[in-house]
Amino acid sequence: MIVQRQVWHDYTKYLIADNYGSVQLELYDKEQNFGGTAFIYGLYVCPSYRGNHLGDALLDQAEFCAKHAGHKAVFLEWEEKDSPKWVLEWYLRLGYKEVKSDKQGCLLKKELKQQAKRRTTTSADGLPRGYTKTLKRSDMAIDILSLRIGSHILVNGKRERVRGLDEDNGLIIRFPAEYVLASEVEPIAITPELLKELGFENGRVGIWWHWWKDGFHLQHRDESEYWHFHGDIGFRYFHELESLYYMIYETELIPD
């Protein structure tokens, strides 16, 4: 996920984008006509990628930027001509409250809870202070460039789903809208137990174990750390397997 910060003479704008969706956020020093100082708009997810929680991740990121820049609430609009009713219902489930409405739509507001975090001070760009340093690739326990939204990693030994990425600063966004350094997480090794959990079947031919699911075929030798896709592409970690599976089938191995 790319987060671009633009500073203009009377407001700060954030452009938050992924390959499949984007959202924008404007932050003001003084209260505006909508009744606040932080306004989210332009949230869009490609139809083919809806249902994968990308909208949650984009909205979480916008709220995170507003909160860590010192804003107490965010506002957004729902308009019937542009969005179906279920989008409004989704906003309400996420904690937004209706503050004004008319025949065209309504204005929504969400209070941002200021939860205690391990690092609470912020830098000028709205990121936690100390997270703004660009990390060298050699400092990372996991290659952040190999991750995508939807990948799974280990955080303190627990499997978690990646909700967003800030590749420039080596940050992985957890749910809900919490950063963790790439150097603080671990990749998940592919194991027979994991593949069985995911519904793969298996059989052995000679020195090779064959694992398959929905026409997706892996091969593995007992003494090897690597798993091979159709005998060609080799990889070791679950997030690499997830990316390849999604590229082929456009669906997640672990629905969320």
Image: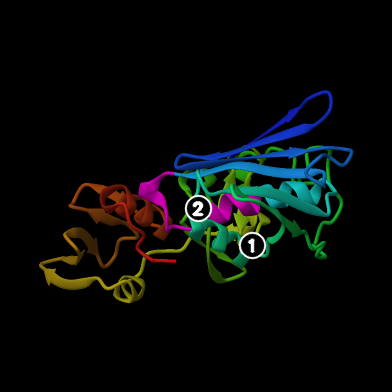
Q: Earlier in the sequence, mark 1 or mark 2?
A: 2
Q: Amino acid at mark 1?
A: Pro
Q: Is residue 185 left or right of residue 200?
A: right
Q: Is residue 75 left or right of residue 247?
A: right
Callouts 1 and 2 close, C-beta under 8 Å: no
Residue 230, horizontal then vertical, whole percent:
18, 52
Q: Which residue is mark 1?
A: 176
Q: Secondary structure at mark 2?
A: helix
Q: Which residue is mark 2?
A: 54
Q: Which residue is drawn at the image coordinates 24% and 70% (left, top)?
A: 200
Q: Secondary structure at mark 1?
A: loop
Q: Quadrant of residue 8?
A: top right
Residue 119, horizontal then vertical, whole percent:
82, 57
Residues drawn in magenta: 46-61
Pointer 2 local density, CA inside 10 Å: few below 14, some 14–19, many at least 20: many
Compared to residue 106, the image places residue 32 above or below, namely: above
Task: Check the picture and name the quadrant holding the N terminus.
Answer: top right
